[in-house]
């Protein structure tokens, strides 16, 4: 690993990369991003790795949640605040139910690019490049809008910087106060169609807070008013990730300073590919998405490639098997990784393998399928004696209509009312909290 450099990936086959019209311009933009300050710091990434090491041994739980694909159009303090608010509400419920700390990670400040199944798409009789996220091109359905533009990397960097600034202000400035978060959850329970189902958990949390106060616990303790929110995104665009990779002045190790944690997607997890090469050399916590086609042999090869020293908290395996396949496909992989002694974090992504298209052409997901995959994930871990370490969700703080079902029983006819996603369907705020309370019930069985 002594010969590894941030540019080493360029000697390997790189999937899902944009075909920049001008490599010269792309190189100029990479140099400009490289000259900018880091978005996160190596010490923060190490702290997250330590927190994830606790998840790996069953002493914490992880909530990864945020936008499917961040938008250049939807960048406001209100949008960021509302997304963070949902993550805080969900984590408060999960913390109480699991009786362990929750590591909160936002798919924020970097989730600007998405892998696509085809490089082009048909719009009527016109075939144009696929939309790859705002870091690469625009969603408008014209050939001109879909031309990859490397200068968008600079805009993504600037938006990520301002998002991180707001996240730090909100999480350390009183917005994350536990008592306030609990009041929000009480309001949700009172208004939710299935509110009575959740009254018991909400009431128990209320009594727990009152008990702490009565026992003389300092309710002004910073732990009750401030939280850590770590950022994560799929490290897909390697030009951008390379540009933000810096050598730590304390340890001499390389860190990708675009986010605290990065993951490799299902479509780019080839052990001999450019993404595995790049992320083998940075010292951030790293994740890998695993679909139903993943084999135990492939997973063990990835574990060895990305975490040969078996450092706890370094590697997270994010499974996305599908509601109908998780209990069949997951156990052999759990067994193989456990028996090989790899201290990984196991996280369930119940969204991506449960997507389908309606007759009207809308991509959507059923809330029941999402919960079924989570339940199957927990069942598989219970059977193998391993720890179900967390969930990975695509959510928004807005009142969108993109996923079916939930407490409000959103129907297919209502999808058109507020279908706003740039790419994949997200749970809205109420559906996200429905899921958190369902998950709380599952954790307590």
Image: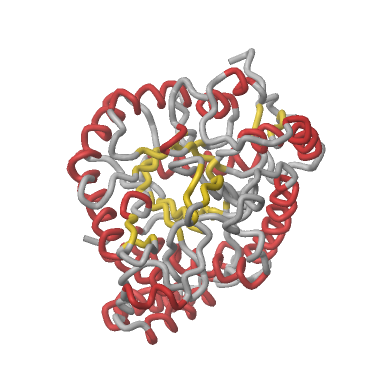
Q: Nearer the viewer, residue 176 or 125?
A: 125
The residue lying at 68 percent from left, 58 percent from top is: 163
User: Relative to 240, is 126 above or below?
Assistant: below
The residue lying at 66 percent from left, 28 percent from top is: 254
Furthest toward the bottom, the residue is 190
Q: Nearer the viewer, residue 87 or 312?
A: 87
Residue 155 horizontal side relative to residue 277, left or right: right
User: Relative to 185, is 281 above or below?
Assistant: above
Q: Quadrant of residue 139?
A: bottom right
The residue lying at 37 percent from left, 40 percent from top is: 57
> Colour mode?
secondary structure
Disc tally is 0
**The N terminus - image quarter:** top right
Q: Picture coordinates of residue 172 (x, y %)? A: 66, 63
Q: Is residue 385 visible?
A: yes
**The C terminus - image quarter:** bottom left
Furthest toward the top, the residue is 3
Q: Nearer the viewer, residue 358 or 365?
A: 358
Q: Nearer the viewer, residue 193 or 49?
A: 193
Q: Picture coordinates of residue 214 (x, y %)? A: 46, 78
The residue lying at 35 percent from left, 28 percent from top is: 299
User: Relative to 27, is 167 above or below?
Assistant: below
Q: Quadrant of residue 300?
A: top left
Q: Picture coordinates of residue 333 (x, y %)? A: 27, 33
Residue 226 horizontal side relative to residue 308, left or right: right
Q: Is residue 228 visible?
A: no
Furthest toward the front, the residue is 125
Residue 155 horizontal side relative to residue 139, left or right: right
Q: Picture coordinates of residue 126 (x, y %)? A: 52, 51
């Amino acid at each position: 690993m002594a010969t590894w450099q941030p540019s080493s990936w360029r000697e390997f086959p790189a999937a899902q990369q944009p075909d920049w019209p001008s490599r010269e311009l792309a190189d100029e933009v990479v140099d400009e991003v490289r000259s900018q300050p880091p978005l996160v710091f190596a010490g923060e990434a190490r702290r997250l790795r330590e927190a994830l090491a606790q998840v790996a041994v069953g002493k914490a739980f992880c909530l990864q949640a945020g936008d499917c694909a961040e938008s250049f159009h939807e960048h406001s303090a209100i949008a960021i605040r509302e997304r963070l608010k949902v993550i805080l509400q969900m984590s408060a419920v999960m913390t109480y139910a699991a009786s362990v700390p929750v590591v909160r990670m936002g798919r924020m400040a970097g989730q600007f690019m998405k892998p696509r199944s085809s490089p082009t798409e048909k719009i009527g009789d016109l075939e144009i490049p696929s939309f790859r996220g705002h870091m690469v091109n625009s969603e408008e359905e014209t050939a001109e809008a879909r031309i990859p533009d490397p200068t968008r990397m600079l805009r993504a960097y600037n938006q990520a910087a301002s998002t991180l600034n707001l996240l730090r202000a909100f999480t350390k400035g009183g917005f994350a106060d536990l008592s306030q978060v609990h009041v929000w959850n009480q309001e949700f329970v009172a208004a939710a169609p299935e509110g009575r189902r959740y009254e018991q958990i909400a009431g128990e949390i209320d009594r727990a807070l009152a008990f702490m106060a009565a026992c003389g616990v300092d309710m002004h303790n910073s732990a009750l008013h401030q939280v850590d929110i770590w950022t994560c995104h799929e490290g897909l665009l390697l030009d951008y990730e390379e540009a933000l990779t810096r050598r730590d002045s304390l340890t001499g190790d390389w860190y990708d300073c675009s986010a605290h944690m990065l993951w490799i997607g299902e479509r780019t997890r080839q052990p001999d590919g450019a993404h595995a090469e790049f992320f083998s050399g940075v010292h951030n916590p790293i994740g890998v998405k695993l679909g139903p086609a993943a084999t135990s042999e492939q997973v063990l090869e990835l574990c060895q490639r990305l975490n040969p020293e078996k450092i706890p908290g370094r590697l997270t395996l994010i499974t996305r098997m599908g509601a109908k396949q998780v209990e069949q496909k997951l156990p052999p992989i759990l067994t193989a990784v456990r028996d090989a002694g790899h201290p990984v974090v196991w996280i369930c992504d119940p969204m991506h393998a449960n997507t389908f298209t309606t007759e009207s052409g809308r991509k959507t997901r059923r809330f029941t399928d999402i919960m079924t995959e989570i339940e199957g994930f927990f069942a598989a871990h219970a059977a193998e004696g391993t720890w179900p370490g967390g969930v990975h969700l695509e959510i928004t703080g807005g009142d969108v209509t993109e996923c079916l079902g939930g407490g409000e029983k959103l129907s297919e006819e209502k999808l058109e009312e507020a279908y706003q996603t740039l790419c994949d369907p997200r749970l809205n705020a109420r559906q996200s909290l429905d899921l958190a309370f369902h998950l709380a019930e599952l954790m307590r069985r």
